[in-house]
Amino acid sequence: MQYKYVVLTNTTIGAFMAILDSNIVLIALPTIVSDLHASPFDAVWIIMGYILVTASLLMTFGRLSDIFGRVRLYNLGFALFTIGSALCSVAPNGSSLVVFRLVQGSGGALIFSNAAALLTDVFPPTERGRALGLNQVAGTVGSVLGLALGGVLAGSFLGWRSIFWINIPVGTFATLWAYFKLKETGERRRGDRLDPLGNLLFSGGLTVFLVGLMLGALVGWDLPFLGMMGVGLAMMIGFVYAESKVKFPMMDLSLFRIRAFATGMASNLLASVARGGVSLVLVFYLQGVLLLDAYTAGLWLIPFSVAFVTFGPLSGYLSDRFGSRGLSTAGLLVTAVALFWFGLLPLPLSNISYEQLLVPMALSGAGGGLFVAPNVASIMNATPAPRRGIASGMSSTLVNTGFLLSLGLAFAVMAASVPETVLQAIFSGAAGGISPLIETKFIGSIHGLFLIMGLIALFAAVPAYMTKKQKAEHAEPSVAFVE
């Protein structure tokens, strides 16, 4: 096997594991909440905590990979992710599960911050979009299995803890394989240093803002929670200022002078905000309002992933030949149509049929498939070879930050529409018997969310269309460094 395909196969396992685990947890969340008697706050942070620590550490790990080598940190990520999975399987309560998910997230950050850079280093420009697309599709195949498998395991005699067991043998194998087979092929920057102040301002600001947002939604918009949101925003603004002053910034702002990089990053962030909370909202709608079991809810959500799998490799192949601008813009427009469709579904949503949800779900998946691979390829092709580690980390950080903001927005809107006791019942999949008025308010909040997300997807299409037309073969070739 050629070495580039060894890298593709191993990073594909990483994408498969991470997305499989994410969707298994998502579809099993109502079961977890019910079994551990977790609060709505813990319920959302079981998902958000993983994404937050990943977003907080990605750029630091990207910098470390540029200094010490991408393969070393990639291998460590597999090992840490596997250990985190084992810990999650024995969590005694909701709070401990949140903490163990942070361990998983640290491993995921090491994997995500290096996978795209590893692929970009070993694949020539004319094949890069296809390789990145296949890697993305593998992750989505994991999401297909995760939706169904998570429902089966959570509802079986094995219980929800078994959803973490499957990561242990796969993670152990992949860790050993990466250790023995992968080698350093990227150019190192040995003189770089870390940026602890930047990392503190970014991760601290994002955490304080989101905690204030969620507590405000649950308890009420009192001054302390509004103050937390203000402090969080101030810290993130301070992060941007600090990055322009330090010698070795965590985020290389000079890369934003490259037009294709800047517009690709902007559309990436907005697209993540638009689609990040969709699956979470639908999971609680299907299990909390329609009262479907976890397995049936998982099957209902499969059209998202099937459509993504269908269009993902096609968009990667076409972006190699014709460039990314048209494909990424079209993907966002299709996503916007799907989100507006969700937002305009006829009431009452408690009586809606599967056929009415099928088309917008398929359109949403197709839009994501059209957008992701061309967008990633345009960002990585526009980045000079020595900076691809930090660029990969920046790209993944914005994706995860967008998802966090989307989840925070979704939770805040849903929590503001119903009392906390009703929200607890909905999150545990036991909302039968709530009053029609309360149900109407909750469903109305879902409608409004989808319309807001559709508008954000339209805004994301603007920078995607502004990306300079550039075919992959014009990109700068990779510079190899072999130990």
Image (cartoon, rainbow, N blue to C red):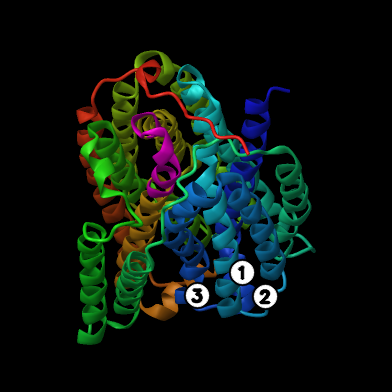
Q: Position of residue 392 (x, y in %)?
A: 43, 43
C-alpha span from label 1 to label 2: 11 Å
Mark 1 neighbour class, 10 Å CA radius: few under 14, some 14 to 19, many 20 or more: many
Q: Is residue 118 visible?
A: yes
Q: CA distance from mark 1 to mark 3?
A: 10 Å
In which quadrant of the rendered image does the N terminus lie?
Answer: top right
Q: What is the number of the mark on residue 32?
A: 1
The picture places residue 298, in percent across and down from the top left corner, at 59, 48
Magenta-tinted stretch? 380-394
- The one nearer the camera, 141 or 218, is 141
| Whether residue 180 is situated above or below residue 416 in the rendered picture | above
Q: Secondary structure at mark 1?
A: helix
Depth check, front residue: 272 or 446: 272
Q: Secondary structure at mark 3?
A: helix
For marks 1 and 3 on the same chain, the one whose residue lies earlier in the sequence = 1
- Residue that badge 3 annotates: 42
Q: Amino acid at mark 3?
A: Asp
**What amino acid type should be assigned to the residue bearing mark 2?**
Ala
For the point 47% across and 43% down, the residue is: 353
Q: Which mark is residue 91?
A: 2
Q: Please tell me how crowded label 2 is: few (under 14), some (14-19), or many (20+) other residues with Cα within 10 Å.
A: some
Dot placed on the residue nearer the N-terminal end, 3 or 2 = 3
Say above or below: 416 vs 108: below
Residue 388 among those drawn in magenta: yes
